[in-house]
Image (cartoon, coloured by chain):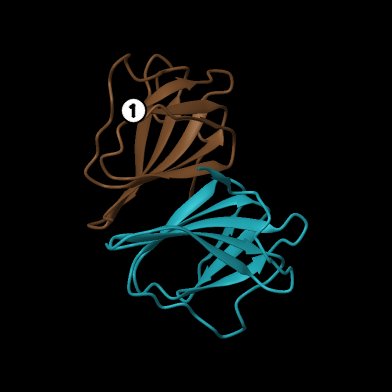
Chain colours: A brown, B cyan
Amino acid sequence: MTANLFDAAPGGRPEAEEITALAEGAGARIERIVSHGQASPPGFWYDQDRPEWVALLQGEAAVEFADGATVRLRPGDHLTIAAHARHRVAWTSSAPPAVWLAVHYLG
Amino acid sequence: MTANLFDAAPGGRPEAEEITALAEGAGARIERIVSHGQASPPGFWYDQDRPEWVALLQGEAAVEFADGATVRLRPGDHLTIAAHARHRVAWTSSAPPAVWLAVHYLG
């Protein structure tokens, strides 16, 4: 009935970022993301139709915005990324892996 | 730009459960809840129109369902509570306080 956010992903491979859907409905999609040092490709920007609330639960990470801001995250830090705010994952820790919680929701 | 899930609530009082809205849109409401040993009143059941995804981030807690199941939660444990699944908070730890993340979303 329950699962744990820090459990290993089934079939997870540390060579790749692991995305697991935890819950989904018409209004929101909740994901757990485990990054093992992965970052977005240089010059790549996410540009999303829906706002995203994101929290870092383990490890360290940094999110870079196209407007020039970089936000460094430690466990427990959270922020809301507005729809169409172009951003990328600048870096993530690998030991321990970065564990993120992301909620994409209808704004 | 960021806040931390483990920060003290502004004006928080340990006599009461503290609920902080972290993000909200048409499709979802994301809340941080800090419980200091509080439980739902005996015989009280939540009966919600929307599904709720809930994770325990700190402390310990137990959620009881009207169908008889009780789910004990430790840090990182998460579950989805279906719309209209009657439930109550059976107990929460006070040292440390129980820190919950709850997402009420359009199913």
Q: Which residue is mark 1?
A: A66
Q: Chain of mark 1?
A: A
**How many labels, in total?**
1
Instruction: State the image coordinates of residue B90 (x, y, percent, origin top left).
Output: 61, 71
Residue at position x 40%, y 25% in the image: A89
Image height check: is A12 above or below B32? above
Residue B62 visible (yes or no) = yes
Q: As drawn, is A63 to the left or to the right of B4? A: left
Image height check: is B25 above or below B42? above
Residue placed furthest toward the front: A67
Image height check: is B41 above or below B27? below
Q: Quadrant of the C terminus of chain A?
A: bottom left
Q: As drawn, is B5 to the left or to the right of A99? A: right
Residue at position x 29%, y 60% in the image: B27
Task: Please name the amino acid that badge 1 sits on.
Answer: Ala
Nearest to the observer: residue A37 or residue A51: A51
Instruction: State the image coordinates of residue A71 (x, y, percent, origin top left).
Output: 49, 31
Quadrant of residue A75 within the rendered picture: top right
Residue placed furthest toward the right: B95
Instruction: State the image coordinates of residue B45 (x, y, percent, origin top left).
Output: 49, 80
Residue A11 visible (yes or no) = no
Q: As drawn, is A8 to the left or to the right of A22? A: right
Secondary structure of the residue carrying tag 1 is loop
Nearest to the observer: residue A77 or residue A96: A77
Nearest to the observer: residue B35 or residue A8: B35
Quadrant of residue B61 within the rendered picture: bottom right
Residue placed furthest toward the bottom: B43
